[in-house]
Amino acid sequence: MNNRGTNLDTVRRYNLSRILGLVHREGAVSRSTLTRETGLNRSTVAALVTELTALRLVVEAEPDVNRGVGRPSPVVRPHPDCVAFAVNPEQDAISIGVVRMNGAVVERIRHEIDAPLGVEETVRVTAALIAELRSRLPADAVVAGVGVAVPGLVRSGDGVVRLAPHLGWVNEPVASLLSDATGYVSRAANDASLGALAEHTFGAGRKVDDLIYLNGGASGIGGGVIVNGAPLRGVGGYAGEFGHNLVTAPDGPGQPSTGGALEDEVNRARLLELLELRSADPSQFEEALLSSTSPELRTEAVRQLGILSIALRNAINVLNPELVVLGGFLASLHAFDPDLLESLVAEQTLAASYESVRIVRAELGPGLLLIGAAQLAFEPLIEDPAGLAARSA
């Protein structure tokens, strides 16, 4: 009898997770769609939705009665007061966001800095900004936790930043430090890997099982890969470091390279210098790049597109994706001359590997990495929504 009770509880928790996962990904799902997608009967779906509603994870609304025929089915959406805090530390700024379960960034703070901060100072600033954002949320808001998108190598098991060279971080336990400072469970991962997850879930990569995402930021270039619909993480969580791959030859036979990695050659700082800007958010950067008439800037942008095409050729030949998504300043480079980039990649890539590939820019805009970081906080909640009640008791 006890075993049967335990099994029933396990099944209930599993089905709660399935329902919440569908609502999370789709944003708004009718009860009839939930019934069809899960294969559960209507009364079971109704009971599960009622439980998720009581936990303040979803809300129900009446559908548009003017659409379709027959009795309309209630629509289930993520609760607007169920949020996660998302963090993206960079060389020139720390971005903090409040993100809802459906990937909507409802508030964002960009805290500009003159130079990269150490981990302790980053945690102090971040905790203060999170407290400020929390004070503007309803008192009974459900906070799933904190997710951190780090431009560097992050160990998947415990969120320790093994190396973030542009921030000067080595073996720093940023996730546990943030947990202590904020009181919320915090998790960290590589920023570009989270960008790939965000675009796969909500953006250009929806319904695409095999994609490569490359992100360009102030701290360099990183990447993420989705294979058969799941993130490619590697043994320690370090997969996708495209920015450190060589794209130009070493200085000579037997000589070490003095550069030549993708992020050395395709470089946001160089473009900012030619634009005569000290710093810029993604929208400002793209506007300046596309409107510039500087011959030097245009020459450099074309050179960087040529180097980027080499990196994309290598990645496509190895991984054979359906989609390549470019984010951050790489999306702006793509917008500078998309036809040139695509023709260069096509010329260099094996014809069979390239024939089904599309190269697009990220769809989620400046909030992309915050959306990805928030998924770190939402994942445990979606895996076990019922656990929320136990954790809150």
Image (cartoon, rainbow, N blue to C red):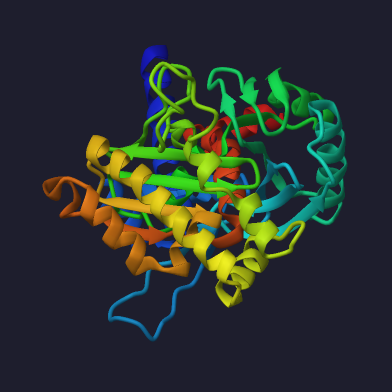
Q: Nearer the viewer, residue 339 or 23?
A: 339
| Residue found at x 56% / y 20% | 155
The answer to whether residue 112 is left or right of residue 64 is right
Residue 348's x, y, as percent?
23, 49
Q: Which quadrant does the C terminus fall into?
A: top right
Q: Residue furthest left?
A: 352
The answer to whether residue 140 is left or right of residue 82 is right
Residue 373's x, y, as percent?
59, 42
Residue 41 is at least partly visible in this image: no
| Residue found at x 46% / y 19% | 255
* Image quadrant in which you'd find residue 317: top left
Q: Residue furthest bottom?
A: 66
Residue 287's x, y, as percent?
61, 72
Residue 13, compared with residue 142, is above or below; it is above
Q: Nearer the viewer, residue 297 or 317?
A: 297
Residue 368, compared with residue 149, is above or below; it is below
The answer to whether residue 150 is left or right of residue 120 is left
| Residue found at x 47% / y 68% | 336
Residue 251's x, y, as percent?
46, 28
| Residue found at x 60% / y 59% | 366
Residue 102 is at least partly visible in this image: yes
* Image quadrant in which you'd find residue 181: top right
